[in-house]
Amino acid sequence: MLDLSTLNPPQRQAVTHREGPMLVLAGAGSGKTRVITCRIAWLIEQGIRAEHILAVSFTNKAAGEMRERVGGLLGRTVSRQVHLSTFHALGATMLREDIEALGYQRPFVILDEADRFRIIRDILRELRVGGTRKTEARILAIISRAKNALCSPAELPEARYNPEMPRAQRVHTLYGQALRNLNAVDFDDLLLLPVQLMRQRPDLREKYRQRFRYVMVDEYQDTNAIQLALLEELVQRERANLVVVGDDDQSIYAFRGAVAGTILEFDQRFPGARVVTLDQNYRSVGTILRAANAVISHNDQRREKNLWSTLGAGDPIPSLEFPTDAEEAEWIVDRIRRVAERDARPWRHFAILYRINPQSRILEEVLRSQRVPYRIIGGQSLFDRKEVKDLLAWLRLVLNPRDELSLRRVINVPPRGIGTTTLAALDQRAREDGLPLLDAVRAALRDGSLPERAREGATQVVQALDEARYALREAAADGLEDILDTFLMRVSLEKAILQGDRNEKIARIRWSIVQDLIGDLGRIDAPDARARLDRFVTDVSLDPRTDGGEEDADADAVTMLTIHSSKGLEFPLVFLCGMSEGLLPHQRAIDEHAVPEERRLCYVGMTRAQERLVLTRARATRRRNERIALRPSRFLDEIPPDLRIDRIVDSVGASQAERAERTSRGLAEALARLDAIDPDAS
DNA sequence: TCCAGGGGGATTTTT
DNA sequence: TCCCCCTGGA
Ligand SMILES: Nc1ncnc2c1ncn2[C@@H]1O[C@H](COP(=O)(O)OP(=O)(O)OP(=O)(O)O)[C@@H](O)[C@H]1O
């Protein structure tokens, strides 16, 4: 049940807001997300049906968190009926329903990064222009930015000076055609196509408007043009029941086309909008809040905020220097273990934040060797796994045998004697006769034009797919697991995986990952087997990294994540590592004069901490077997000296005096500070 | 024609 | 350190 007395007056005003657009603009930890979750509960108590409520956030992690909080207020049964998702998942849902209206088949394929690279590489090869991976990445980025800005590459602001632009323009067109031919969409299409859909089909737009009558958006400062367009199609401007919350200081998705100014212009875009601000921070102790505010105040063009907290003064923030990132990692993990033991803290109270994913590797090694349970959010761990992609490809084929991309991927997994040449011949035949690739395989089997060694395998694949599809047609929802078991056995997925790696142990792990993933099927419920499979495939494509689902979220483990994915979350104890020039701010941001965005990133990272924040950095790191010297981040200097304690922690054996001598602040000062720090800080 | 093994290259941030 | 591509053996 919702208790309005757990809210302060402006929060209450936003929660019980009735009609029309509203913006809640407030700093970190001021209870913006709580406004959204409580508003959902309030609406339902007012008799609004859960399925008429849509709440959007930006990361899968944040959406999951929100679902949990709503579940806490209303119970799981009701919270499951609320539409709670990321913009992309929302788009995927709409497309799963209506993509046929745009001339695609159902189900469609959602491409991952590797698929996109492969397509670009093929196009460049066809155009007879070679390209390094860097070029390919640049072109992909241009295409993505254009889609997110709802324009062609030539219309982008960067068009004049980006050297890849002429090529990107041509590739853009071919890329679009390639995706169409493959019946595939990329992540950007998940936003773009629903907008097109609603613009072309007012009847469908009306259907969605009727469905999503109350709309809320968390982290509104990160909305870009295409997401805004989607929102505008979904709500009626003046009469919009739209409540958005955000903080211009936490705008950290400029690379995706978000503009910090968008949130400040909300009332121009949605006329008559009410604006509410929140000032009280309920998350962090005083030192953390003041230090974060000090850093962010170095940005201009921001809305000045007046955040205060009553959670106590807090300790000064240690800012620690280590010889290398390996020692930095050792120290962090050691410290986590000691504090966990001393204060009887569960592991889940600790988070380690970093700027880029590869920084997690060394931490992961140490955590593992010290047997500290941990969980990595994001990164490439599950995303890039061959076995997961193969599984998905097979499942997609069951849903849609015309999915050529998937068929090409797995037809020779495990090796079935259908190599590049055989495949090319099949491809040509398909093109000549206007057949889908799978039907070309059938035809080649029938008239014997398939090489001898490929026949047996091809027959197996065709039959397995036919049988699975036939079984699926009739099956009740709970019949899905058996059908898939049989199907995967027939296409030898297990064999492919176990043979696929010389290291048997690794192969077994790979297979167990696939099994775990299939086990997650149990959590998906839909009217029939086909719909369940469809949902499953979309879910995994959108967020392949949440392998364990709900029980994992509850697991007691140290959390490791990038600052970007930490947005909206909070932890009692936070280690923000890699506080060096080149990492935070990142070198590329420095080169591109984008330091203010990095400063916001630093602000977001610092404000995740509730009780204690520790900033760490290394003098050197190793990249591609090269030692790279690192200087302290400029953001450290922006924290007032009375709020931080600078220390140098050298390898075991260095005396305290020696350590102190190396601090830039001088021996006496450093020693004085050492006394102030709590006894087991080293 | 298929495929395993070695050499070369690569790291912003998310969906 | 891990991943992709190419080449030579079967
Ligand atoms: N009125 C309140 N009384 C007590 N605690 C509150 C209140 N409002 C919010 N909180 C708590 O403060 C913390 C931060 O709230 P919340 O996550 O909603 O902030 P936020 O503004 O969304 O933060 P951010 O911008 O960093 O995402 C949460 O632990 C929340 O439960």
Image (tube, coloured by chain):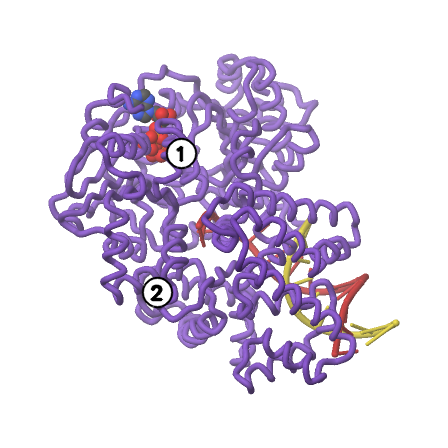
Chain colours: A purple, B red, C yellow
Q: Earlier in the sequence, mark 1 or mark 2?
A: 1
Camera-side residue of A458 and A503: A458
Task: Evaluate whether residue A196 shows in this view.
Answer: yes
Residue A18 occupies which quadrant of the picture? top left
Q: Which residue is mark 1?
A: A77
Could you say whether the residue bearing mark 2 is in a helix, strand or loop?
Answer: helix
Q: Are the residues under badges 1 and 2 in a single subunit?
A: yes
Q: Position of residue A295 (x, y in %)?
A: 36, 34
Task: Using a 10 Å C-alpha cutoff, classify the residue at mark 1 as few (fewer than 14 neighbours), some (14 to 19) or many (20 or more).
Answer: few
Q: Image quadrant for the N terminus of chain A?
A: top left
Above or below residue A547? Residue A198 is below
Task: Using a 10 Å C-alpha cutoff, classify the residue at mark 2 as few (fewer than 14 neighbours), some (14 to 19) or many (20 or more).
Answer: few
**Identity of the residue furthest to the front in this view:** A474
Q: Is mark 1 within 8 Å of ligand 1?
A: no
Q: Position of residue A639 (x, y in %)?
A: 39, 29
Callout 1–callout 2 Cβ contact below 8 Å:
no
Q: Chain of mark 1?
A: A
Q: Which residue is mark 2?
A: A158
Q: CA distance from mark 1 to mark 2?
A: 48 Å
Residue A70 occupies which quadrant of the picture? top left
User: Number of callouts in the render?
Assistant: 2
Please tell me which residue is depicted at 49% across the width and 27% down the height of the picture: A614
Above or below residue A659? Residue A232 is below
Please tell me which residue is depicted at 22% across the width and 51% down the height of the picture: A235
